[in-house]
Image (tube, helix red, strand yellow):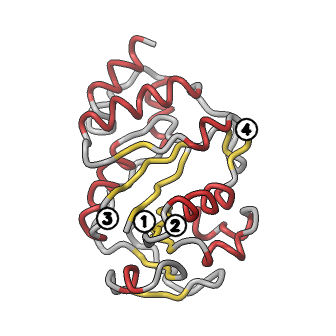
Amino acid sequence: MIGFFGGSFDPVHYGHLKNAAQLKIELGLSKLFLMPCAEPVHKEQLNFSVNQRMDMLHLAVKEFNMLSIDAREIEKNRDSYTIDSLKHIQSEHQNDSICLIMGMDSFNTLNSWKEYQTFYQYCHIVVIARSGALIHQEKYGFKLTSVVNDLTKQKTGFVFFANNQMLDISSSTIHGKIHNYKNLSRLLPESIIDYINTS
């Protein structure tokens, strides 16, 4: 079973990295890929360029070496649609269960994504729920499960809400601190702080 954690990673931070590392263990994933998008369809303009975001991801996976990078959406260099990536991933990994990892905000707005009604045919969804979030329900054709083994029994179609305590860091908090030259320690790896400070 493999996982794909998509996002703009603008910049990648401990909220992404520590949560992903925990999930890899919790779900027993053989691989977990961070999958940066080129131009996110649902967000405003990014703060860092494609090259800068990739540089920071490469720095991040040196420290979090249990994680990998999947650059397919960056390499397309156009609007990123998750459904297109899911179709390619499924064709490449026909013998694996595929977990698409996302936050609760993304899950609750999935009905604004291209061809969201067909996602259940290509993957399971694993939701990183913020503390206090109570919306644990079946949606978009996915069946709810709280049993990790269900994700291995069939290749697609379940939604699973992660059990572990998730680190809640927002990119907007980081952007504000960068803009105001405030301390970024405990939010980002030191290698990425150094990169931002010298960029």
Q: Amino acid at mark 4?
A: Arg
Q: Amino acid at mark 3?
A: Leu
Number of marks present in the image shown: 4
Pointer 3 or 2: first along the chain: 3
State the residue in front, 106 or 186. Answer: 106
Q: Amino acid at mark 2?
A: Met
Q: Residue at x 43, y 39 (%)?
A: 12
Mark 1 falls on what kind of element? Answer: strand
Dot 2 corresponds to which residue?
104
Mark 2 falls on what kind of element? Answer: helix
103 left or right, relative to 30: right
List x then y, in percent, for residue 170: 46, 47
State the residue in front, 71 or 16. Answer: 71
Dot 3 corresponds to which residue?
29
3D distance between C-alphas at marks 1 and 3: 15 Å
List x then y, in percent, for residue 176: 50, 32
Which quadrant would residue 44 be assigned to in this image? top right
Q: Is residue 51 above or below residue 62?
A: above
Which quadrant would residue 95 be assigned to in this image? bottom left
Residue 128 disc label: 1
Q: Residue at x 26, y 48 (%)?
A: 66
Instruction: Judge depth for marks 1 and 3 and give the one in front.
Output: 3
Which quadrant would residue 152 be assigned to in this image? bottom left
Pointer 3 or 4: first along the chain: 3
Residue contact at pointers 3 and 4, CB within 8 angstroms: no
List x then y, in percent, for residue 184: 33, 30
Mark 4 falls on what kind of element? Answer: loop
Dot 4 corresponds to which residue?
78
Residue contact at pointers 1 and 3, CB within 8 angstroms: no
Pointer 2 or 1: first along the chain: 2
Q: Residues within 10 Å of mark 2 (few under 14, many from 20)?
A: some
